[in-house]
Amino acid sequence: MLFLSTTVHGLEDIAAREIEKFGARILELKTGKVIYEGNEELIYRLNYGAKRIFRIAVILSMGKIKELEDTRKFVQEADFCINTTFAVRTKRRGEHDFTSMDVNAVVGEEILKKCPKAKVNLDNPNLTFLCWVDNENFIFTIDTTGESLHRRGYRIYQHPAPINPVLASLMLKFAGWNGEKMVDPFCGSGTIPIEAYHNYNRVPNKFRTFNFPKLPFFDEALWNGIKEEMDKSERNKRLELYCVEKFKKHVNGCKLNAKNAGARFSCLQGDAENMHKFVDYAPFIITNPPFGLRIGSKKKIFKLYEEFAKELEEHFSGAILTLIIPYKKFENYFEVLEKRDIMYGELQTKIYRFKI
Ligand SMILES: C[S@@+](CC[C@H](N)C(=O)[O-])C[C@H]1O[C@@H](n2cnc3c(N)ncnc32)[C@H](O)[C@@H]1O
């Protein structure tokens, strides 16, 4: 079987390594996508266990197109049959004389010809076909995930600027963290330490549901066996994870989220500029500081960065600092070990690994 998973653009290689660990053979990395092959177990294993991808889609057919009408043959040659409600959604990159909606309409029409018992339902379909048009390349897939995997289902407190949990998990790997003492000094609602706890303890994506039970080739016995095996391998090791956050409201929210996620760590109210007063030296600092875009002004934010950098220099020398930040500011303070340009939603930003 061939698969396509989406992930954060700029960190595809890190996502691919995770997919590989679940037993897949990686074929290609594309912009924000990983193409791989493996058996159908991957549908269940990845949806339930993967932390660094947004979704798992089964590739039904793929190839080159010159014009809109060429998409029809990919539906015709694909080996599938459905007799339930469906929708087609298309992501398009490049210059074309047709829109994503045009692809949805043409592909939808062909699916109806192929599967006369199927019915279009754009609002609440049982199955979703995802088409990817990337210049002249066309990939026709069926989704297995449903709501994106970044919707973990454990967040009950909604921070105004939370980090995407998939990105948080990618950052942990990028940082080289593997269970060591770690601090998030701008922790907000606690996504980074929650993901750290879940990643290390192999906590599956058990706070949500998936779309694969609605697939025509869903194998319930196989899924139940895999779920049981993965549930058994979950650990509950207490880690030295520390959260520091300035505002009481977010500290309380962080505690609520951590409890709901079954993640055990300390959330402390404090100031990152005086972090050593709340947490002793830690070899890993992994964080998502305010950018000054949504919260506070840029001048104030740059002052905060300066004070935070001084604090790190004085009390955390030798540690690894991993940051997501849209500015180069920290390059003035610390040695850059690695830097990646990433797309975070619509925002072009960077993740850095520094040596303090
Ligand atoms: C971008 S948010 C972090 C969001 C977090 N990663 C999450 O997923 O919820 C930055 C956080 O830093 C906090 N903050 C701002 N200045 C701070 C300071 N001096 N010390 C500690 N926290 C601070 C803000 O209140 C905000 O919650």
Image (cartoon, grey):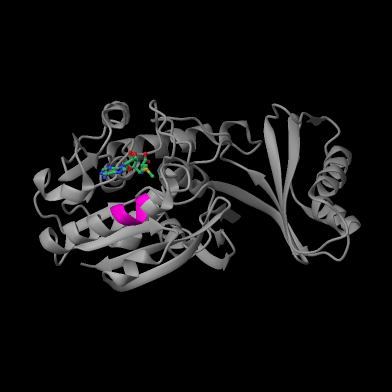
Picture coordinates of residue 101, whole percent (x, y) = 82, 45
Residue 1 appearing in the image:
no
Picture coordinates of residue 222, whole percent (x, y) = 48, 38
**Does 38 appear above or below 201?**
below
How many numbered circles are shown? 0
Q: Is residue 340 magenta?
A: no
Q: Which quarter shows the N terminus?
A: bottom right
The residue lying toward the viewer, choosing from 72 and 66, is: 66
The residue lying toward the viewer, choosing from 204 and 103, is: 103
**Does 276 appear above or below 316?**
above
Q: What's drawn in magenta, residue-wise?
A: 300-304
Residue at image location 31% in from the left, 55% down from the top: 303
Picture coordinates of residue 308, whole percent (x, y) = 24, 55
State the image quarter where residue 206 is shown: top left
Magenta residues, dominant SS class: helix
State the image quarter where residue 22 is shown: bottom left
Picture coordinates of residue 317, whole percent (x, y) = 14, 65
**Does 318 appear above or below 241?**
below
Residue at image location 58% in from the left, 52% down from the top: 346
Q: Which quarter shows the C terminus?
A: bottom left
Locate ligand 1 by image quadrant. top left
- Left/right of residue 226 with respect to residue 73 in the rendered view: left
In this view, the residue farthest toward the front is 299
